[in-house]
Structure formats: structure tokens, C-alpha cells
Image (cartoon, grey):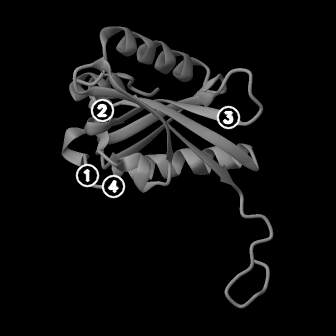
Amino acid sequence: MIDLHDYEDLALESGAFKDIELDILKEILVEWQERPDTSHTVLELRDGKILAGFVAFCREAGTDYSFELRFLCVDRAYVGKGVAEALLDSIEEEVLRREASAIIRIETSTKKESTVGAGAFSAKAYATMGHITDFYGPGDDYYMYAKHINRQVGAKSQEGKPQ
């Protein structure tokens, strides 16, 4: 059985989430642990036994192939060391196992983005779809990012032969 305390502690220690968000995370984790085939998927990255980071995402309600990143948490010791980027890669790989093409949407804040590494989303080619200054408070802006991903079907190798 998975110890959910690692995930909860990492989110709490980030200082980026409000109590209601931590309660939602706990509900998502309990549901995922009890029924992993339900709406949310949780992926992690560990350095040995240390939880370096994790993501929780789900299919966007009412859509055919859109997904929403609900939580992205990175241990403070691993911020800026590629963990956020590796987790974003993991989401894309997992989604593309399910769908040939998909949209991944992220809503975040300046505060939350700084706890995973500023610029991580743009570094992975997520486009800024929305930005509202001081939405959550002075200096804590709202951002919406999105990225369209798809499988490379019939891609050609450098020799011009199908892979």
C-alpha cells in the first residue's frame, strides 16, 4: 500500500497550497489509492526513497481528449534540477498512451509556479493562454497554460525510412 503521507507532506511543505486545496489533494489521493482506475492519475519521481516530486491530473470533464493538471509538487531540494520538467514529460507520455492526440491544461499562480521552478511550463512548450495580475493577491498572479500533444504516427527516421 502506498503511503499517502509523503505526498501530503510534500504539498504542505511547499507552502503554496491553501487548506482547502490540501483537503482536495487528500481526497484525490485517497480515491486514487482505493481505486487507481478512477478519474485521477498520480505519477511520482523519486530519488531513492525520497519523493522528489509528484503530479496529479485528470481528464477534463465534458471533453473527449483534454486533461487538467491538478497538482504539481516538487521537493524544495529538487527545484531547478529538472524534476518539474521530468514530471511534465511523464504526464505527456501517460496521456499519449491513452490518446493519439490531447490537450493538457494547467491553472497555476505565481506562488505555486515558484515552488516547482519558475519557467518550467514554458520550458516544456506550454503556451500561456491567460494571465491575470494580482488575481490571488498582490504579486500572486493567475496563469493558464496549455499544450497540444500528439503521437508521431508514421514519423520518418533520418534515413528517410519509417521508424
Q: Residue at x 43, y 18 (%)?
A: 25
CA separation, marks 1 and 3? 28 Å
Q: Which residue is mark 3?
A: 66
Q: Are marks 4 and 1 in contact (CB under 8 Å)?
A: yes
Q: Are marks 2 and 3 in contact (CB under 8 Å)?
A: no
Q: What is the distance, in whole Å, between disc 2 and disc 3 at their CAs?
A: 24 Å
**Residue 18 lies in what quarter of the image?**
top left
Q: CA distance from mark 1 to mark 2?
A: 15 Å
Label 1 crowding class (10 Å Cα cut-off): few <14, some 14-19, many 20+? some
Q: Position of residue 64 (x, y in %)?
A: 77, 32
Q: Which numbered tag is attached to residue 110?
A: 2
The residue under label 4 is 82
Q: Is residue 25 above or below residue 75?
A: above
Question: Where is residue 82 shown, x and y percent of the image?
Answer: 33, 55
The answer to which image quadrant residue 71 occupies is top left
Q: Residue furthest bottom?
A: 159
Task: Give whichever of discs 3 and 4 has the lower sequence position.
Answer: 3
Which residue appears at 69% of the width and 48% of the height?
Answer: 97
Badge 1 element: loop
Residue 80 numbered mark, or none: 1
Q: Indicate the secondary structure of the residue bearing disc 2.
A: helix
What is the x, y in percent for residue 128?
Answer: 48, 42
Q: Amino acid at mark 1?
A: Gly
Q: Residue at x 68, y 49 (%)?
A: 96
In the image, farthest residue toward the left: 77
Reading the chain from its start, which is encountered first: label 1 or label 3? 3
Q: Secondary structure at mark 3?
A: strand
